[in-house]
Amino acid sequence: MRTPFVAGNWKMNKTVAEARDLVSVMGKELNKIENIDIVLCPPFISILAIANLLQDTKIGVGAQNIHWEEKGAFTGEVSPSMVKEFCNYVIIGHSERRSYFGETNETVNKKVHAAIKNGLTPIVCIGETLEENKAGRTSEVVSSQTLEGLKGIDAATAAGIVVAYEPVWAIGTGLAATADDAQNVHKNIVRKSLTDLFGEDAAQKIRILYGGSVNAANAADYFTREDIDGALVGGASLKTEDFVAIAKAASK
Ligand code: PEP
């Protein structure tokens, strides 16, 4: 049995003051929900404030990115050991990082290893673009992102990581994948690739989230599918009512 998992990716939204206001309301509601892991991923600058507000709750805090090096001349970057002072999780390889900041399966793999080495649970994002989807390349793209992004991890460690399947065409567009289509990718492409990499036992333990225009109205449908273990939520994670509804639906 995999514990449901819901993460909110705030992207580049909310000042520190706004983030505090949001979490002081949302945090209380989220903390009442049982049988689920919930993680908020604010921008770096708000992490300390949010971690303080959530310190006596069950809610985890995640970063949206890390560098793979521990320290040094990497202006503007943040290292895993800096993040781990306040976070237990880190999103790695989000499609916006892949498309705007040149991240590749190779850099994703370096970051995943750096996260694990520092005791951070990576939430590793994979997903095909609209062009790739239309060209019938979903299986090829998503399996190679999984195999290359997660290579070199031992099976016992891999069992604890989180993978998020986020078709790029569904992110922030309102064009969510159907629950049936997402289940098909989760089972036949993602979990199959995880089985090839880590064996059946570990692959069955890895939580695979769906991400892409999940909202309060469509969330419950995803969670009825066997291989959809939760959601990575962008826009709707900035609204208390919506994110709480999504987390409640996942916890059932
Ligand atoms: C995301 O940023 O990971 C995401 C899924 O965004 P949205 O929910 O807004 O589509």
Image (tube, grey):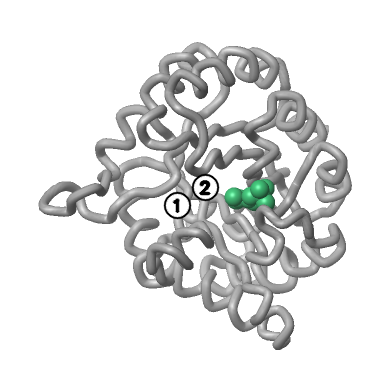
How far apart marks 1 and 2 lie (CA) works out to 6 Å
Amino acid residing under circle 1: Thr
Amino acid residing under circle 2: Gly
Q: Which of 95 and 163 is in front in this view?
A: 95
Q: Mark 2 points at which residue?
A: 160
Q: Which of 160 and 25 is in front in this view?
A: 25
Q: Quadrant of the C terminus?
A: top right
Q: Point out residue 219 in the picture as x, y percentages from the top left corner.
A: 81, 43
Q: Indicate the secondary structure of the residue bearing disc 2.
A: loop
- Taking 73 as reference, is 99 left or right? right
Q: In which quarter of the image is residue 112?
A: bottom left
- Taking 233 as reference, is 45 left or right? left
Q: Point out residue 43 in the picture as x, y percentages from the top left corner.
A: 43, 37
Q: Residue 157 carries which label?
A: 1
Q: Point out residue 248 in the picture as x, y percentages from the top left corner.
A: 78, 29
Residue 154 makes an appearance in the image = yes
Q: Indicate the secondary structure of the residue bearing disc 1.
A: helix
- Taking 151 as reference, is 217 left or right? right
Residue at (71% x, 57% y) in the render: 173
Residue at (70% x, 79% y) in the render: 133
Residue at (81% x, 37% y) in the render: 216
Q: Point out residue 122 in the picture as x, y percentages from the top left corner.
A: 46, 49
Q: Mark 2, residues whose alpha carbon is within 10 Å: few (<14), some, or many (≥20)?
A: some
Q: Do the residues labelled 1 and 2 touch (CB within 8 Å)?
A: yes
Q: Quadrant of residue 202?
A: bottom right
Q: Quadrant of the N terminus?
A: top right
Residue found at the far left of this picture: 73
Residue found at the far bottom of this picture: 135
